[in-house]
Image: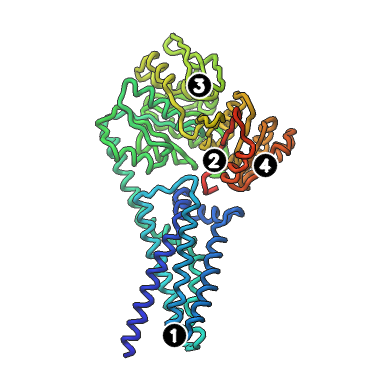
């Protein structure tokens, strides 16, 4: 008889643990999306969750509190059922977890999670981790019940399971570290495959790096080279080893003449690692500023990291004029962009004179800001080097369309919207403000400030705030950097009546609805992803 009781109790523990594993995993959708945004770095997820305006811990704590109170009440109401009262007391867990999952689904991440194979594998590992930890706690509670034998404890023995929501973030981080036992060597194998694939092909590789302008310049260059060649590029802003490997392994390189690889970095050595995967025949450096100083720690390290592409470049590199001085001792042949002149930037686009091979042509593009002309010039120099005619280069420049979230202009109900959500650097912010001021009507900015500037973060954001003085309305979002921006704005004579600080982008949009009118122009600058 004792054996059957023991088996029954074990089955009960397993079933309850599996249910909790499922509940906890389904409750982690937003947190897993944030972890993906953190590039699967557990420490960064913890720092994100611990921010003052982040309600993740609080919401999980509320879930746990509701579960423990309701479970205790239900268990006591069914105390006449003996040991089964504790099982009946689990019903509120299902109810409140269900409500939490439903409500959590209503709060969308600004950068939605992509359900990649890695993401799905992590979900599976998380389910196992949650189920095992739940089983251990349930077993210990039942063991305590057997040893102690107090009737009240027996009825309430599953109430302590309310601690599980509070353990969810640590369990996610634990699952992430366990998953890396497979993911790290798997990624190495995948990257090795891409490296070998490029090495065995005769495709021309172009590497693009810089503190800003990489994606825009990549798209511009792709359009120009596409006039003559079959071009493969890394998609969107994919600029990591896995991002490059995905582009290479997903395509037959025999179908392309040129591969353009965007190369990002947060530490010295990152660009060198990318160049080992796809050694560039040609390279572009779009510009240098104190972006990602938080991880680089100094401007010298940024210059050193970006310069790694020059050591790997086999033929020729093209440099933006404002960073050429940093690389005057380059190990490869370099050319500084000097083909752009007579730039005129306005609300209807940008025009400039493009000079290549001794010939000049006037070009007009819908892209906004004088800086875009120099990105076009940088790409044009390399395209001309590779044999694309000036006529085709100019034609491609005039056909360019807005790059998503990079000073992308849309008009709605007579209101101009400048979406510069992916702009997160000092020089880009100044360029965006210049574009905003080129428009007529009232000028409004919505921004959280500029991140990842390390020790310069407060200083640069205060100076950025000074530049906002004179705008018709300023809405600062969040609490990450708004204090120095606000201080800079007010110190430069900004009108406090025209300044608002809101906790979230949604709150800022609500504020906008109150003040917007036809003819206004709104700049959304640096729409920080959820991890900030």
Q: How crowded is mark 3: few (under 14 residues within 10 Å), some or many (20 or more)?
A: many
Q: Can residue 201 be seen in this view?
A: yes
The disc, 1 or 2, on the residue closer to the chain's N-terminal end is 1
> What is the secondary structure assignment of the residue under circle 3?
helix
Can you identify the residue that label 2 sits on? 527
* Label drawn at residue 81: 1
Q: What distance separates the C-alpha of mark 3 from that of mark 2? A: 24 Å
The disc, 3 or 2, on the residue closer to the chain's N-terminal end is 3
Q: How crowded is mark 4: few (under 14 residues within 10 Å), some or many (20 or more)?
A: some
Asked whether the residues under the numbered discs 4 and 3 touch, taking CB atoms below 8 Å apart as contact, a structural biologist would say no
Can you identify the residue that label 3 sits on? 373
> What is the secondary structure assignment of the residue under circle 4?
strand
* Residue 1, position as x, y percentages in the image: 31, 90
The disc, 4 or 2, on the residue closer to the chain's N-terminal end is 4
> What is the secondary structure assignment of the residue under circle 2?
loop
* Residue 158, position as x, y percentages in the image: 47, 77
* Label drawn at residue 500: 4
The scheme the figure's colours follow is rainbow
Write the residue at 36% across / 28% down: 281
Q: What distance separates the C-alpha of mark 1 from that of mark 2? A: 55 Å
Write the residue at 37% across / 65% down: 128
In the visual, does 202 lie left or right of 176?
left
- Which quadrant holds residue 52? bottom right
């Amino acid at each position: 008889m004792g054996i059957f009781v023991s088996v029954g109790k074990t089955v009960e523990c397993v079933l309850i643990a599996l249910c909790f594993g499922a509940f906890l995993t389904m409750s982690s959708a937003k947190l897993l999306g944030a972890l993906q945004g953190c590039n699967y770095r557990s420490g960064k997820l913890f720092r994100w969750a611990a921010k003052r305006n982040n309600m993740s811990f609080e919401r999980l704590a509320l879930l746990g509190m509701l579960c423990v109170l309701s479970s205790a009440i239900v268990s006591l109401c069914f105390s006449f059922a003996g040991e089964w009262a504790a099982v009946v007391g689990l019903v509120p867990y299902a109810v409140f977890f269900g409500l939490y999952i439903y409500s959590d689904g209503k709060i969308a991440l600004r950068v939605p999670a992509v359900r990649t194979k890695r993401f799905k594998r992590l979900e599976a590992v998380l389910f196992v981790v949650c189920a095992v930890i739940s089983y251990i706690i349930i077993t210990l509670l039942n063991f305590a019940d057997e040893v102690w034998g107090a009737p009240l404890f027996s009825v309430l023995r599953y109430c302590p399971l309310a601690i599980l929501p509070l353990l969810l973030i640590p369990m996610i981080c634990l699952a992430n570290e366990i998953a890396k036992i497979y993911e790290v060597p798997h990624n190495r194998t995948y990257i090795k495959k891409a490296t070998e694939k490029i090495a065995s092909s005769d495709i021309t590789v172009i590497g693009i790096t810089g503190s800003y302008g990489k994606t825009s310049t990549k798209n511009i260059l792709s359009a120009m080279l596409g006039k003559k060649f079959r071009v493969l590029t890394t998609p969107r802003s994919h600029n990591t080893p896995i991002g490059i490997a995905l582009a290479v392994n997903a395509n037959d390189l025999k179908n392309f003449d040129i591969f353009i690889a965007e190369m990002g970095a947060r530490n010295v050595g990152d660009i060198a690692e990318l160049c080992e995967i796809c050694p560039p025949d040609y390279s572009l450096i779009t510009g240098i500023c104190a972006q990602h100083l938080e991880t680089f720690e100094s401007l010298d390290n940024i210059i050193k990291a970006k310069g790694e592409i020059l050591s790997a470049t086999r033929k020729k590199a093209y440099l933006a004029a404002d960073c050429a001085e940093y690389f005057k001792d380059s190990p490869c042949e370099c050319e500084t962009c000097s083909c752009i002149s007579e730039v005129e930037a306005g609300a209807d686009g940008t025009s400039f004179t493009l000079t290549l091979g001794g010939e000049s042509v006037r070009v007009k593009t819908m892209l906004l800001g004088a800086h875009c002309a120099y990105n076009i010039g940088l790409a044009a120099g390399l395209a001309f080097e590779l044999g694309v005619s000036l006529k085709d280069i100019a034609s491609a420049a005039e056909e360019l369309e807005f790059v998503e979230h990079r000073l992308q202009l849309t008009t709605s109900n007579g209101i101009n919207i400048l979406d510069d959500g992916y702009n997160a650097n000092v020089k880009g912010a100044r360029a965006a403000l210049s574009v905003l001021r080129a428009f007529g009507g009232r000028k409004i900015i919505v921004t959280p400030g500029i991140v990842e500037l390390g020790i310069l973060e407060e200083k640069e954001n205060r100076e950025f705030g000074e530049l906002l003085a004179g705008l018709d309305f300023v809405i600062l979002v969040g609490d990450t950097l708004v204090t120095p921006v606000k201080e800079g704005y007010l110190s430069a004579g900004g009108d406090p009546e025209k300044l608002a600080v809101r906790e979230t982008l949604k709150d800022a949009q609500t504020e906008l609805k109150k003040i917007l009118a036809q003819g206004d122009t709104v700049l959304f600058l640096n729409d920080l992803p959820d991890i900030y």
